[in-house]
Image (cartoon, rainbow, N blue to C red):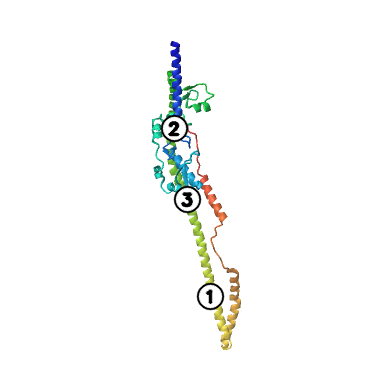
Amino acid sequence: MGGVNSCGSASASENGTLDSTRKYLQIDSLIICPLCTKKYKDPRMLKCQHTFCYQCIKSHVYSIKQSGSHEVTCPLPQCRTWLLPAKTLLGISVDKWGTYFPKNITISKILENLPNDEEYCDVHEDKLYEYFCEDDRKLSCSTCVINYHKKCDNVRPISEFTDDPSKFEGVCKTLIADLKKSLGQSHTIINQLKNNVQKLEQQRDVIFNDLEKFRLEIINELDRNEKVIKEKVNELIDEKYEQVEILENLEGKFAEYMARISNHRTIEAREKLRSLQIVDKFTAQDVVMLKSIQTKFKTVNIEFVLDPHKETHVKKQLKNIVLDHFLVTERAVY
């Protein structure tokens, strides 16, 4: 009888494990969205009774719009039940789409009563954590064990590991030691960075003052050059005014000489002598002066021409001068 009871007990244990496994498999089939193949987030039901994540439904509607179709159907290939015209949804705010896709209350309740999210694998969201790898000190689901820990020697079910006080306490002590070390390192780094920020703020004031000083020096140099150019322009204009005045005076003399000589038949003998003197003076002085003017006086054109290539070069040089003096030196924190 004892042997029978023992066998019956083992059989009951195995059946319990199988029932538990079947239970999770059945639940998994209910809580996984067929579109994203992940655990439902805000499950919504279509009129064909199929359920999807609300965001998956939205993405499905937008893909229909991009394809140029005008009808919204169930996204499952084996269903394709007609739901409503696409323009009905696209013509209203997305916030109001929930009217056409009601929440699946049953699945929502199942999700609420499932273990907390942190009990599900971070990598395989539809799988529960069931194992602990002592070699890597990581929680794992059944898929993780196959994919990432098949070469590890110490992979045990979570319940078996936590029920072993020495193993569990040993891992906790190691973890606490690592955390203390990490806290000390992070505290040191934080202090270094805080000190660095204070130093940077002081250096910022110095750099900003130096930049302002450099900017003013460049502006002053430009102002000086501008003053020189303006003075040269004004000097050229004044010079041309003087030349015009000289020529106008010479022109007046020529007109006066011509008026006197034009009346040579009617003037008296004494005036004829003066006319000869005028001719002599004209040929001796004014002609020479006129020839000199023709040689020396020139028309001048002025303009301020910015050569695009030189302008670009100057700007580049100025940029290099400024940026080359801005130095950033990095050093690893420790």
Q: Secondary structure at mark 1?
A: helix
Disc 1/disc 2 C-alpha distance (Å) = 112 Å
Residue occupying image coordinates x 58% and y 75%: 286
* Type of amino acid at the residue the image marks with label 1: Asn
Position of residue 183 measured from the top left corner of the image (x, y, whole percent): 43, 29
Q: Quadrant of the N terminus?
A: top left
Which residue in the structure is indicated by mark 2? 30
Residue 329 vertical position relative to residue 169 in the rendered view, above or below: below
Query: What amino acid is labelled 2 in the image?
Result: Leu
Residue 143 vs 14, above or below: the answer is below
The amino acid sitting under disc 3 is Arg
**Label located before the other in sequence (1 or 2):** 2
Q: Which residue matches tag 3?
A: 215
Mark 1 or 2: in front is: 2
What is the distance, in whole Å, between disc 1 and disc 3 at their CAs? 51 Å
Outermost top residue: 1
Q: Quadrant of residue 114?
A: top left
Image coordinates for residue 145, horizontal then vertical, percent: 51, 26
Q: Residues within 10 Å of mark 3 (few under 14, many from 20)?
A: few
Q: Is residue 178 visible from the viewing direction of this image?
A: no
Please tell me whether mark 3 or mark 2 is closer to you in this view.
2
Asked if the residue at tag 2 contacts the one at tag 1, i.e. Cβ–Cβ closer than 8 Å, the answer is no
Q: Does residue 294 appear to the left or right of 218 in the view shown?
A: right
Residue hosting label 1: 249
**Residue 203 screen position, x and y as percent:** 45, 41
Calculate the distance from the C-alpha at mark 3 to the C-alpha at mark 2.
70 Å
Q: Decide which of 80, 45 is in the foreground and name it.
A: 80
Q: Residue at x 53, y 51 (%)?
A: 315
